[in-house]
Image: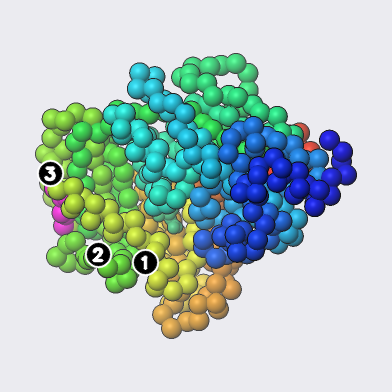
Amino acid sequence: MPDTLTPDGLLAELATLLGPAGVLTAAEDIAPALADWRGLYQGKAMAVLRPANTQEVSACVTLCAAAGIPIVPQGGNTSMVGGATPTEDGNAVVLSLARMNRIRAIDPVDMTMTAEAGVIVKAAQDAAADANCLFPLSFGGEGTATIGGVLSTNAGGNTTVRYGNARELMLGLEVVLPDGKVWNGLRRLRKDNTGYALRHLFVGAEGTLGIVTAATLRLFAPPRANEVLFCSVRDEDAALAVFRRFRAVDETAIRAFEYMSGLGVDFAAKHIPGVTWPLAERADHTILVDLASTRADADLQSLAEQVLGDAMEAGEVIDAVVGGSEARRQALWRIREEHPEAQRKEGASVKNDVSVPVSKVPELIRRASAACVALIPGTRPVPFGHMGDGNIHMNLEQPEGMDGDAFLARSHDIMDTVNEVVRELDGSFSAEHGIGRLKTDMMEAWRGGAELDAMQRIKAALDPRGIMNPGKVLP
Ligand code: MLT
Ligand code: ZN
């Protein structure tokens, strides 16, 4: 392939390869792929490519490599950090995996599913359920996010406390490397110690080392009993104490353990139709506990009552409601799932997706909230999220009456303020949303030295021309 392929020549070759429907160039057709859903970035690109299979992805990458044209892989475009949208240079192509949406195989004996990158997470869940299995990854964007995207970002979500992050759900990968070579690593082995665990390199790399085109995923036995509890608790320490109580009685029963501030629940009740405070009295701190068991005869209600009884006696839980019907359980989950949307409707907000050791979550919430209020008086902390795995969305809502843009202009000060606390508590500045574009400038301070140096060498070795998702992850 000549190294002199011009951009026009490249587009002509791609159109021959993929057909006119596989190469979008009209402004109105490519617009949705150029902006992230949070509205943080507005990029440019020459085209959106829509290959239908791995061979076509490989051929696209080979052609782009020959032309020196950068490639931005895109799944459901639900990145929280601008990881899936192109930069403003305009010389890149977006490569959408949307057409690669086949479930290639489900094996209920091996408990594995092999799915292409463009399969939507919800579709993977449904396909697993049809085979009487569970694909446990679950989060707000599951109706849009794709398997390739969740692996490329190592998505976490609500069930990490029980089943792990996307990485732990992955047994094998198929990847198109930056030179167009296809690596078929779709093994479905639980034990395979044969050199470097290459597959793990691509998980969380956000498409900077190659394009995940398919994956073999772990499945589990589906829960046959389920119970959801919503409780008001005395404070952050009480929330953690209740988590420890459940863990001590039956760790395997905890499917999710989520914390929400009272203000976050207020926002959901104010902005989301159908959502109301589920308890007689408002409180400053709440938790949502999702219990599940693979045993149909598991008595989760008794388990809940036993733990709640003890926690109430200890003054940790103030009030509680137990779901009961499926509709009721879903209604309780909605309060939590609608937090991002409710926060958006309330005004400008700054997201801080951080993690600390679970034992430090109460201190994180208290100290980061106080520090941000000291920085910008009137700022409204809305911490919520995955307390059971230490990942709190330490989000800040603009002060009432303040101009939203003026608040957002302070984003970096706010992030720095939160991160100072996170660092002191041995945490991470990015727990589950990744680095994308938003946080590349923090990599040096947090991962600089041997760690970042090793990452940069890996990048240079696999992608010497730097064509894979440039401007993301690495500074
Ligand atoms: C969630 O868990 O709802 C999202 O990851 C958090 C967010 O929008 O900050
Ligand atoms: Zn989250």
Number of the front mark, 3 or 1: 1
In the picture, measured across the screen, residue 294 lies left or right of residue 72, that is left
Amino acid beneath label 1: Ala
The residue at label 3 has a CB less than 8 Å from ligand 1 = no
Which residue lies under the disc numbered 2?
Answer: 275
Does label 3 or label 2 sit earlier along the sequence?
2
Q: Give the alpha-carbon distance from disc 3 to disc 2, as whole Å.
A: 25 Å
Q: Between residue 161 and residue 470, name the one nearer to us.
A: 470
Q: Quadrant of residue 340?
A: bottom left
Q: Quadrant of residue 41?
A: bottom right
As drawn, 51 above or below 419:
above
User: At 70% across and 29% down in the image, what residue appears?
Assistant: 181
Q: Secondary structure at mark 1?
A: helix
As drawn, 40 above or below 3:
below
Q: Between residue 15 and residue 130, name the one nearer to us.
A: 15
Q: Secondary structure at mark 2?
A: loop
Q: Residues within 10 Å of mark 3 (few under 14, many from 20)?
A: few
The x, y position of residue 253, in whole percent, is 25, 35
Q: Which mark is residue 342?
A: 1
Does label 1 or label 2 sit earlier along the sequence?
2
The residue at label 1 has a CB less than 8 Å from ligand 1 = no
Q: Give the alpha-carbon distance from disc 1 to disc 2, as whole Å.
A: 10 Å
User: At 13% across and 35% down in the image, what residue appears?
Assistant: 299
In the picture, measured across the screen, residue 195 lies left or right of residue 191, that is right
Number of the front mark, 3 or 2: 2
Amino acid beneath label 2: Val
Which residue lies under the disc numbered 3?
Answer: 305
Q: Secondary structure at mark 3?
A: helix
Q: Which residues are magenta?
A: 319-324
